[in-house]
Amino acid sequence: MDWQEGKDKFIQTWGTLGTSWGINRTMAQVHALLMIAPRALSAEEVMKELKISSGNANMNIRALMDWGLVYKELKPGDRKDYFVSEKDMGKVVKQIILNRRKKELEPMLKVLDQISGVEETCEEATAFNKAIADIKMFSSKADATLEMLIKAESNWLAGAFLKMIK
Amino acid sequence: MDWQEGKDKFIQTWGTLGTSWGINRTMAQVHALLMIAPRALSAEEVMKELKISSGNANMNIRALMDWGLVYKELKPGDRKDYFVSEKDMGKVVKQIILNRRKKELEPMLKVLDQISGVEETCEEATAFNKAIADIKMFSSKADATLEMLIKAESNWLAGAFLKMIK
DNA sequence: CGGTTCTTTCAGTATTTTCTGAAAGATTAT
DNA sequence: ATAATCTTTCAGAAAATACTGAAAGAACCG
């Protein structure tokens, strides 16, 4: 297989994967492109490579920077912005977990607190309280674990895996 | 807070959470509803409760059954189908991991194999091979770990957490 | 300054995803 | 069989999401 073909296939696949994780296709494709680029790319190069508009490129690159997956790089004597991706998959996953924990798990825990202990005026209410208590316990445990993981060393993932499967 | 209010809030929140995980809102809401129900519900009850059409209810309930998160329950002398949700959060998460591993991680690994080792005719191709090799190694590790987890016993998650945070 | 180059915004458009409801298909009872 | 009840399908409609490109905004240069 030649390089061009491999590259296109990878970008396409990564985009599809992103879609099923609630990340939009283009954002995932930009990420894929930067992951396999041997050097920083300008927004213009990204636009051309993926055949997307300037607005689209700009917005998705920014989103990736917000997620901490892509960094801006300035070259002396050049007015363009260049972008590089984090290439260590362990760090990529860590950033994603970090973001999602904050954006999803934390709000969920907040709501669970709010709706804990409704008045048990009927069978349904009793079942409800029990279910919510279970979910809350599980979620808190998950939250605590994730917090620990992201604070841990850079090689946390391999370590965590080892402990888990022991 | 009274029961009705808590229930609505939970269903709404669970639906929103589902959305950001690539699960459609209604499917997540049906799941939420069944999670907190003290007994099996009929499709009709689901439709009324969530104010959705029969087709929509039917399709999403089926999807939940495909995921192994909801089971059909028949009552003697009643022609309606009733549905119950898996309520043990550990099992719910396990099912989800199982499904996503099969639907996402496995195809990804396949593609990575296909695009491994493109001819190194330029700088880009070399960088590409390196990036792909990294991603492949990481993904295989993750895959192996997940396989182990889902084969482990039912209380695996709590156990894993305990080991991790120790 | 005024010109040049690059970045950002956003209203309108396009695409994708999801939902509805009526019709067709099953299943059971009489 | 025929009717009654429940389930499934699917074409078209609606809603949600993402994209474009032109215009406005910055930053830099001479």
Image (spheres, coloured by chain):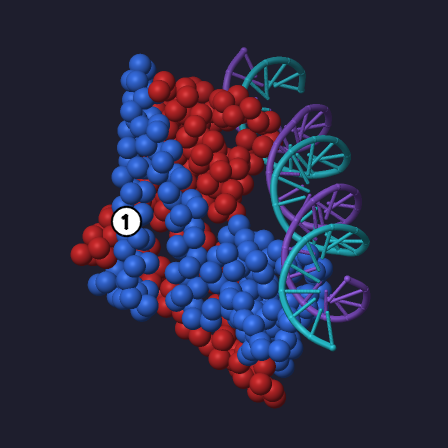
Chain colours: A blue, B red, C purple, D cyan
Residue drawn at x 39%, y 24% is: B6
Closest to the observer: A102 or A7?
A: A102
To which residue does mark 1 refer?
Answer: A144
| Residue B20 seen in this snapshot | yes
| Left or right for A144, reference A95 | left
| Left or right for A55, reference B90 | right
Q: Position of residue A101 (x, y in %)?
A: 39, 49
Q: Position of residue A19 (x, y in %)?
A: 56, 54
Q: Position of residue A64 (x, y in %)?
A: 53, 59
Quadrant assignment for the N terminus of chain A: bottom right
Quadrant assignment for the C terminus of chain A: bottom left
Closest to the observer: B2 or B35?
A: B2
Q: State the image quarter where residue A16 is shown.
A: bottom right
Chain ID for label 1?
A
Residue drawn at x 48%, y 36% is: B15
Compared to residue B14, the image places residue B148 above or below, namely: below
Compared to residue A40, the image places residue D11 above or below, namely: above
| Left or right for A134, reference A13 | left
Q: Position of residue A124 (x, y in %)?
A: 35, 20
